[in-house]
Amino acid sequence: LTNLSAGDSEGKNSFLEPLHKTLGISPEEDEVLSGCFHIFPYDSNSPIDHSSYLLPLRRFKSFNEADAKLPMNPPPYIMVDVPKYSPDLASLIRKQCLPRGKKGRPKKSSGPTAMIITNRNSVHGSGVYDEQEAFRTGIFDTESDVFAWRREFPSMVIAMHRHDVRSDTRGALWEIVDGYGPWSFDAGAGGMRTLERGEDIPAEGASVIYVPGHTPGSVCVLMPHLGVVVSGNLVPDDPPMRLDAWGFVTTNSAGIVRQANSIRKVAKMCGANAKYMLPSRGGARKMGGNEMMILADTFSSFAPDEK
């Protein structure tokens, strides 16, 4: 599928682009990324608008048009983070999740199985909400775009960590996780499951890791079968030169050292299971060597007195 764009009511665009293209590699270089998509904001140069992702919970199997015995039946999809809603973008996402029956005939699509929100700043529409102003005026009816996506895909599980839930998002959530995790999304059960102590990260599906720092309830999403970790706002896309240009230091709300420790945690947990990092701000990129540990040390240097 080539990259597609969807206009919204303001004439701006969202882009649904194959992850291969975002990473600058050919599909042949890494076939496991087939069926993975990067949802660009309408202004990818803006630090306010965040990228989102549409990812399969199992490896994608291509459809052999010449063999009717092998119809394409795409695996369940999840969305990570909340793009700006538009009917056109929703239609593109629904088509990508379209299952096929006998002889490859399309069946009705209910859309993605789940939406996992990595942090409160990766919810489109929340940036216009001022909680102090709401308390001053008594007006609390502002809605983020999570509500629009919930109405579009009513069976989609929408989950985020309790510490990051805001009043403009709470009513649209299906599940609120709490504690330290990690959690695994169980498509069969339709919800999040806390992994037992010592239990390995599942080889397929989406595992959610608690990484406080940028916000109190930040999480990452690890998908070993794809070799990706969706890092949310844990790290910038081009460390360390754009560390503060994208506001990673100045917008930290739960402690610089805490965020640095979370970076180290992800580096240790995901090192062997992730080749690519998919951040909320900036572009997807390959993970290299010990760069996350170096980035953690860089973060710590911004707050030498913080404990």
Image (spheres, grey):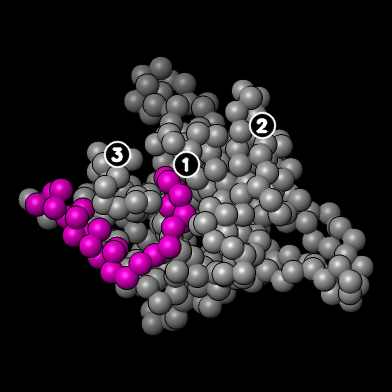
Task: Tell me, yes or no, whether the highlighted magenta stretch contains residue 292.
Answer: yes
Q: Specify which label sits upstream in the sequence, 1 or 3.
A: 1
- Secondary structure beneath label 2: strand
Q: Which residue is mark 2?
A: 7
- Secondary structure beneath label 3: loop
In this rendering, the answer to whether 13 lies above or below 207 is above
Report the residue that reaches farthest toward the top.
Answer: 137
Kind of residue at badge 1: His
Q: Specify which label sits upstream in the sequence, 2 or 3.
A: 2
- Secondary structure beneath label 1: loop
In this rendering, does residue 234 appear at all? yes
For label 3, the crowd category at 10 Å Cα-Cα, with few meaning under 14, some 14 to 19 and many 20 or more, is few
Q: Which residue is mark 1?
A: 50
Number of numbered markers: 3
Q: Left or right: where does residue 183 sit relative to residue 217?
A: right
Query: Which portion, as a residue range, is magenta?
Result: 278-304
Question: How far across and how far down the image is residue 107, in percent?
Answer: 86, 58
Question: How far across and how far down the image is residue 66, in percent?
Answer: 89, 71
For label 1, the crowd category at 10 Å Cα-Cα, with few meaning under 14, some 14 to 19 and many 20 or more, is many
Mark in front: 1 vs 3: 3
Question: How far across and how far down the image is residue 218, in percent?
Answer: 38, 53
Q: Which residue is mark 3?
A: 245
Which quadrant holds the C terminus? bottom left
- Calculate the distance from the C-alpha at mark 2 to the C-alpha at mark 3: 28 Å
Task: Identify the residue shown where x is 37% and y is 61%.
Answer: 210
Task: Identify the residue shown where x is 59% and y is 63%.
Answer: 26
Task: Identify the residue shown where x is 54% and y is 43%.
Answer: 40
Task: Tell me, yes or no, whether the highlighted magenta stretch contains residue 294.
Answer: yes
Q: Specify which label sits upstream in the sequence, 2 or 1.
A: 2
Task: Identify the residue shown where x is 61% and y is 59%.
Answer: 36
In this rendering, the answer to whether 47 lies above or below 234 is above
